[in-house]
Image (spheres, rainbow, N blue to C red):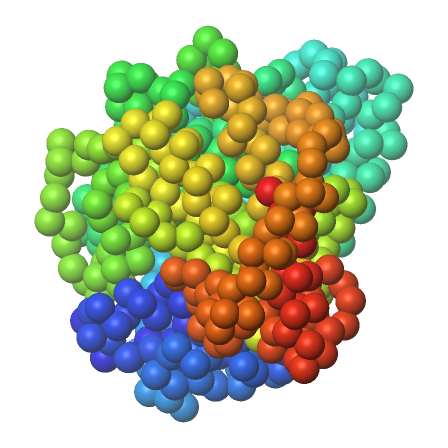
Amino acid sequence: MFTKILIANRGEIALRVIRACRELGVQSVAVYSDADTTAAHVRAADEAVHIGGSRASESYLRIDALIGAAQRTGAGAIHPGYGFLSERAAFAQAVRDAGLVWIGPPAEAIEALGSKTAARQLVVGAGVPVVPGTTEPLRDADAAAAAASQFGYPVLLKAAAGGGGKGMRVVERPADLPAALDAARRESQNAFGDDAVYLEKFIDGPRHVEIQVLADAHGTILSLGERECSVQRRHQKMIEEAPSVAVSPDLRRRMGETAVRAARAAGYVNAGTCEFLLDGDGQFYFLEMNTRIQVEHPVTELVTGLDLVEWQLRIAAGERLPFAQSGIVPRGWAIECRITSEDAASGFLPSTGRITYTRIPSGPGVRWDGGIEPGTDVGRFYDPLLGKLIVWAPTRDTAVARMHRALTELVIAGVETSRELHLRIFEDAEFRRGAIDIHWLERRVSSLLAARPDDATTRAAAVASAFLAREDGGSHPVGDGTTGGSADPASARAGGDGTSRSASSPRASWAAVARREALRE
C-alpha cells in the first residue's frame, strides 16, 4: 500500500478519498485553488498544496501543477476523483510517465472508451448491444440525413467526446436536422474541444440503468450490480438508487455479464461504470463507460458492503480481489439525492453565497457525503454539488420514507438548494411506485414546483416564536449532526433570505432562519 497519495480534486469527493486514506493508514495531500483556500478538504488532508487561481483552468485542470505537487510532497500515487481530469488519458499517461501510480484505469482503456463512437465499435466486437446508430462521426448534413433515413425518425444527435447532455439534440423531422447538427457541433466544440457528433435512433421513455464494475490487474472483473439513475434533469442525474425496480435477478445477471465483457474488451482495471438504456420490453443498450469513480457510488457501497474507494487504492497498489461474483448479492435498498446550490423555483439558476448554517440529518441508515460547512463560500467557478444525502433500508418503501424524513431534517442556510424539489419528488405517487424513465422529471417538474396552498405564514410565525423562546431561555437550536463551525445563525453574516444581518441582532437572525425553514416545509 502507498504511504502517501495526492488527491487531484476538491469538495466532497476529495473528502471521501481522504477518509479512505485515513482508514488505510495512508497520508493524503490535498490541492487547492485561490477560491478553496479555506475549504474543508484542505484542512482535512495531512498536507495541502496551492496550485493556482480560482478558475479550474488555472488550477484543477493543470496537469503540470498537479504532478509537481505530488513530486514535491513525496506522494507515490494520484487519485483523480470525478470530473476535472479524471477521464483524461493524457493525465493518466503523464502520471505514469512521472513515475507515479494512477489510481484508475490504464490510459489506454481511458483512450479506448473516451470517444463514444470508438467505444461503440469496441463493445460491438465484444457482443455488447448498442442503440442502433452510426459507429463513425457524421461527416456532414448529407451523411446525417442518410443515417436518419436508415434508422428512422426521431433520431438523437450526440457528441462523440463527452456527456452530460452537451452536444445532444433530438430531431423529430428531416427539416430540423441541418440546424440541429450545426447546434450540436458548436456545443460539443465549446464543451469538449471536439465537434464530432454521431447519430442514434431515439428510444422513447427508457430508463437509465448502470452497472458498477470492479477489476484488478490480475484478470478478475466483477459486476457489483445496477443503479437506477432515471431521475434526471437535462441529462444531469438528481436521484440514484440501488437496486432498480425494473431489474429482475436474471436481467441483473445478463447486464452484469455484458458490462464485464465491455470492460474486458477495453483492458479495464480499477472501478468503472457501464451505462445502459433499458426499454420497456427489458432490452438494454450500451451507452458509454465512465472510466472513474461515479458520484453515485455510495448506493452501491451500501447494498454490497464494499468500500469502492478503498478498493480503488488496493487495486492500484497491486492487490487481488479476494471475492468472487457469486458473493456479490445486493442487500436492502439505497437511495441518493444530489443536493445542489440551485434555485429550482427560478429556473434552476445557480445560487452563490456563504453557507451560514447547516443541520445534517442522522439516524439509522442515513449517510451524508458533503464538502460544505458554515463559512464555506459557494462560488461560480465549480460544480454546484454541495453534498449527497444517502439512505439505506431493508426495502424500497422504507428507504423512500427514510429519505423523506432525512430531507425534512436537512438545513443548509446561505444559498438556495435543491432540497425542496427533492422533498416533493419523494412525495410524488409515481416516483413512490418507481414508475419513472429518463424523461419523467422533465414532464413532472412544473407540477412538482407549483405553489401549494397552505398556511406557511402561520407556521413560519409559530416556528420563529419557538426559536425565539429558546433563545430567550439561553438554549440554541443547534441540532444533531451540525457540520463544523458555529451553528448559531445569530453569528451568520446573512440571514439566509438574502438580507444582511448584524451579529449583534440574534433575535432577527433566529427569526430569519426560522421563517425560511418554515416556508420550505
* Res. 49 visible in picture: yes
Determine the residue positioned at 49% across, 11% down.
280
* Res. 258 visible in picture: no
Q: Residue 283: x and y, percent?
A: 44, 15
Q: Residue 291: x and y, percent?
A: 43, 50
Q: Quadrant of the N terminus?
A: bottom left
- Name the foreground residue: 162 vs 251: 251
Q: Quadrant of the C terminus?
A: top right
Question: In the visual, does 412 lie left or right of 125?
Answer: right
Question: In the visual, does 131 lie left or right of 246?
Answer: right
Determine the residue positioned at 33% across, 87% down.
74
- Name the foreground residue: 135 vs 238: 238
Direction bottom: furthest residue: 72
Q: Residue 329: x and y, percent?
A: 19, 32
Determine the residue positioned at 36% across, 33% down.
399
Q: Is residue 219 above or below residue 356?
A: above
Image quadrant where residue 497 sits: bottom right
Direction top: furthest residue: 281
Q: Is residue 231 above or below residue 213?
A: above
Question: How many numbered discs?
Answer: 0
Q: Residue 308: x and y, percent?
A: 29, 52
Question: In the visual, does 414 lie left or right of 177?
Answer: left
Image quadrant where residue 266 sits: top left
Q: Is residue 335 above or below residue 481?
A: above
Question: In the visual, does 203 lie left or right of 97?
Answer: right
Determine the residue positioned at 63% across, 56% down.
464
Q: Is residue 415 above or below residue 243?
A: below
